Image (spheres, rainbow, N blue to C red):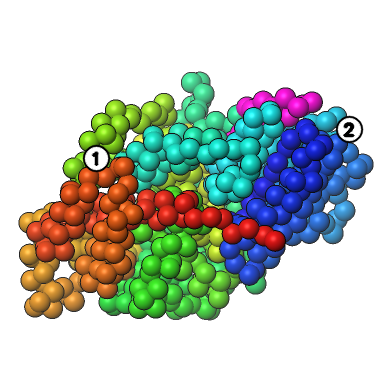
Amino acid sequence: MPGLIIIVQNNPALFERNRALVREMAALISHEPFYESRFLESHELGLCAAQVYLDHEPAAGAPGKSSDGSIQCLLSGEIVDLKTLKAGCDCPDASQNCSQIMANLYAKERGNVISRLNGYFSLLVFDEHKKTVLVANDRFGMQRFYFARLPDGGMMFAPEVKCFRLMPELELTVDTAAVVHSFRHDCILNNASFYNEVRRFPVATVFRCRSGRWTSSRYWTPHPSPDEVRLSQREFIDQTAEVFEAITEEYYTPGSTALSFTGGLDTRAILSVLSHRGHTPPLFTFGGVFKDSHDIKIARKLAGRGDNRWGIIRLGKEFLDDFPSWAARAAWISDGIARLNTCHEYYLNLAAREFGKIRLTGKYGSQVIRGVTMLKDRSPDLRIFSDDFRRTYIATKTESGATGRAALLEQELPQLEGARHTLEMTALTVRTPYMDNRLIDIVLRAPDIEDTSLLQKHIISRNAPHLSDIPTNRGELIRSQSAFSPTRYYYRTLNFIDSVYNWEKLPRLALPVCRLGDITRISRLFVGRNEWIHHRVWFMRELKDFVQGLILDPRTLDRPYYDRRALTTMMRDHFSGRANYTPEIIKIGSFELWCRGSEQPLPRSS
């Protein structure tokens, strides 16, 4: 995926080798034809760096250099409020190069500027005269970034773990605790990777090197101070709405941006603000093949209220026919953190480039505004594990000192949601106003609110009242204050039935009922109304041969993590209908694809 590759070793004999390695790594992670690279080096500091970026990114251009020539910079990603920052530095008026603007800002303010940066980014700044190097990431660590300490005291940074396999000084060993986290939480926690020697760059962190000595520090924390006063509900709604309306336009670039549109409130709030300010972004909605979902039906109605171009991107036969390839590509790109049930994100976001190379979305609105959390213990049936690994699994504890929104910002979003975000950002640029620094600062002072959708309803009602009379995909009426609504009851009943039918953890006793629904075709009345991704069903039908071939392959059965007999029994019971092991299949299959990719020789440049 796009990002920075940096090697710093104060050994002149290794400079040319590292220079070639950085170029080889850049080629390794350039997954699509629309990727480009630029390079930056310093013999004086033993630094070799590359930036891999999408051809439309606003940071495109030469590496940044301050007006006085003292500071050089590479910035991957984008800064949202660039105009505001640009006004505070000595930078040519016509410059849109983020790296150049950042170099001038750093020359003026030094490290103090990092905490002001708003967006998803990774950053390299160095000063040859003072022999200093600075590497930093954004507040929320949403742009994937890893590091490794080299035996000679040097450091290496890269956006993908596979790059570290090319570094001769590193002998990578599998981190068993990371494997446990992958099975237990569907992600790797504690800033780990599948290798002990490679760590994820912590959120809101700066690494500094002065005269060959590296230190690190946090520049921001989501933990509120003890004396910070929480807002009242009215204050929270008013202040957050005011900030949301002020910032949303900054996330929209006419001609390049399309809004990923659903039937929910988060994206409707974005559309209402843009519509109020005279913008008509193209809209698209993801959907399946069974029938038009509530998302599609509602999005169609909402789009019809304006002059927006709107279309559907469907996940259907073309994707399923090539599912093994998409699954393998997702595992390769994400270094194993993507799951079998998330590989469609890469396919869909590549297709979304037809509407715009920048995808504006309501992502993380539920987590940030409503405090919804998805990080939990999702352990599989432990009988699938070998005796040795089962003991290790039970003994490995998940440590977390953070709770509430702090845990959500520090762990859940960058580490659990990081897999989906990686696949999306590999295909295009993703923006969401719900992760804006200015909005988060208010949300961290939010009170307990009984109706957590009040904010979005308030924004929609006062910016685009004509979008208020169409129910959401959950049947909520924005203008209605009634606790009971026939519309809400209708939508939620159909959504519940559809969700149960597609539930990956569907209980064994419910399987005959679902089969009866398929035989009598009753299921056609509700399947696809709410859920348009159907992995439990696909794994039993269209993808049955792929699943059986992957799990029952001797390479999988012979891994030290599994009980061979238990896996064979699991697959027999699953496909005979005696049990539902879809979650286990997803976990085992996802990890197996990473294992196979990690065992293959890396493609090497000539």
Residue 592 vs residue 434: left or right? left
Q: Earlier in the sequence, mark 1 or mark 2?
A: 2
First to last magenta residue range? 203-217
Name the residue furthest right: 68
Q: Which quadrant does the N terminus fall into? A: bottom right
Pick the front one: 38 or 445: 38
Q: CA distance from mark 1 to mark 2?
A: 57 Å
Counting other residues with Cα less than 10 Å from the Cα at mark 1, is it few (<14), some (14-19), or many (20 or more)? some
Q: Quadrant of residue 606?
A: bottom right
- Which of label 1 and label 2 is nearer to you? 1
Which residue has dot 1 on it?
386
The residue drawn where x is 88% and y is 38% is: 70
Tag 1's secondary structure? loop
> Amino acid under label 2?
His
Magenta region includes residue 206? yes
Q: Is residue 244 left or right of residue 30?
A: left
Disc 2 element = loop
31 vs 165: above or below: below
Q: Which residue is at the front of the view, 547 or 472?
A: 547
Tell me where residue 34 appears, x and y as whole percent.
64, 68
User: Disc 1 residue type?
Assistant: Ser
Residue shown at the point (62%, 61%) measured from the top left: 30
Image quadrant assignment for residue 55? bottom right
Q: Which residue is mark 2?
A: 129
Question: Which residue shows up at 43% across the image and 75% down it?
Answer: 313
User: Which secondary structure dominates the residues rendered in magenta?
Assistant: strand
* Whether residue 441 can be seen here: no
Task: Name the one closer to the observer, 5 or 66.
Answer: 5
